[in-house]
Image (cartoon, grey):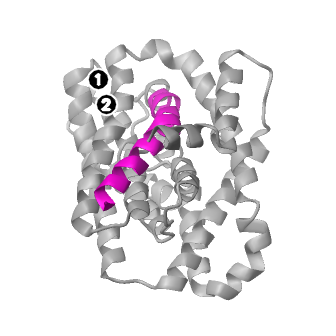
Amino acid sequence: MLDLALATLLSPVILFFLLGLSAALAKADITIPEAISKGVAIYLMMAIGLKGGFEMAANGLNLKIVSVMITGVLLSFTLPAIAYALLRTTTKLPAIDAAAAAAHYGSISIVTFVAATQAIELAGLNNAGYLVAVAALMETPAIMTALLLAGRHRPKSQNGETGLIREVALNASVVVLVGALIIGWVTGADGKAQVQGVFITPLQGVLCLFLLEMGLSAGRGLRHGWRLLQPATIGFGIYMPLISASIAAVFSALLGLSAGESALLMTLAASASYIAVPAAMRIALPEAKPSIYLTLSLGVTFPFNLTLGIPIYIAVSQFIAG
């Protein structure tokens, strides 16, 4: 496990994230234009979706894959309820802030997922591409659970905000990810041969650029928002991913998943959204504080998962798979 952790930490992807994080904390004058950042994010969604679609085209759907998809949706619905209960009992966060933060811990971080796929390949494990479809399915159920939790503490007139369903269903990451997955699935091996030079071979280098920007964002969030996070809240950002991964590990064992499949499912469960969910929370729970839920997901959980969490999930998955 120590060797795996060191190999992950010393990979270019993680080192560029740490570079951005350190630069932001040191207040270095490094900025990446927003247009470039958005373009890179769209590229990554396309590359990840296509890769998963090509994998599904090669292997097809079966009972096992459908079972994993259903499991992912169930995890996305239930994990926010666990996160909310923990936040309300262990921290002093108001109910609305706790519900908004909890939503992030049932949805997923696609960048954490991509980093995990690279670490899995580094560990010599099989990378199951169909889990990209599971990732797409886990984007939104957590938002619905969070709104149900928050609804008990809000006036009736505030529930069911206009435009929320459209915002969630047509979120850019969801649309591009699912669309690329379908395109990869339909075109199969022929499509893969046509786009490999653009969307498969350069993926690692583009991911380094994106994680540099993510490191800068996480560092700035920590620098400006840490005062709002009490030690118990910061602790939640570290132990909640471990709880979520443990629950996913149980399902992985019951479903008989391989080490690679198990590690990716655990990573999806443990990751915290910082794209789709914050966009939805701005509409659905405008009174919730982004300085709390964004700093927690992007400034605490994201770095933890990239540096320590993923090696732990891979090691546990290897133990489960025997």
> Which image quarter: residue 29?
top right
Dots 2 and 1: beta carbons under 8 Å? yes
Label 1 sits on residue: 94
**Which of 279 and 322 lies nearest the eye of the viewer?**
322
**Residue 98 seen in the current view:** yes
Quadrant the N terminus occupies: top left
Q: Amino acid at mark 1?
A: Pro
Q: Is residue 110 above or below residue 254?
A: above
Helix, strand or loop for disc 1: loop
Q: Is residue 52 above or below residue 286?
A: below
Report, in whole angstroms, how far the alpha carbon at label 2 lies from the one at label 1.
6 Å
Task: From the image, give the main secondary structure of the stretch colored magenta.
Answer: helix
Residue 109 in picture, x, y percent from top left: 49, 48
Q: Tell me: 185 left or right of 97.
A: right
Q: Is residue 188 above or below residue 11?
A: below
Name of the residue lying farthest toward the top:
227
Residue 168 in picture, x, y percent from top left: 46, 55
Q: Residue at x 64, y 30 (%)?
A: 18
Magenta region: which residues? 294-322
Helix, strand or loop for disc 2: helix
Look at the image and say whether residue 303 sits in the magenta stretch. yes
Instruction: Tell me if mark 1 has few (under 14), some (14-19) or many (20+) residues whose alpha carbon lies within 10 angstroms of its own.
Output: few
Q: Residue at x 44, y 15 (%)?
A: 228
Instruction: Tell me if mark 2 has few (under 14), some (14-19) or many (20+) residues whose alpha carbon lies within 10 angstroms of its own.
Output: many
Label 2 sits on residue: 98
> Which image quarter: residue 288?
top left
**Which of 120 and 269 lies nearest the eye of the viewer?**
120
Q: Residue at x 56, y 81 (%)?
A: 185
Quadrant the C terminus occupies: bottom left
Q: Tell me: 193 left or right of 86.
A: right
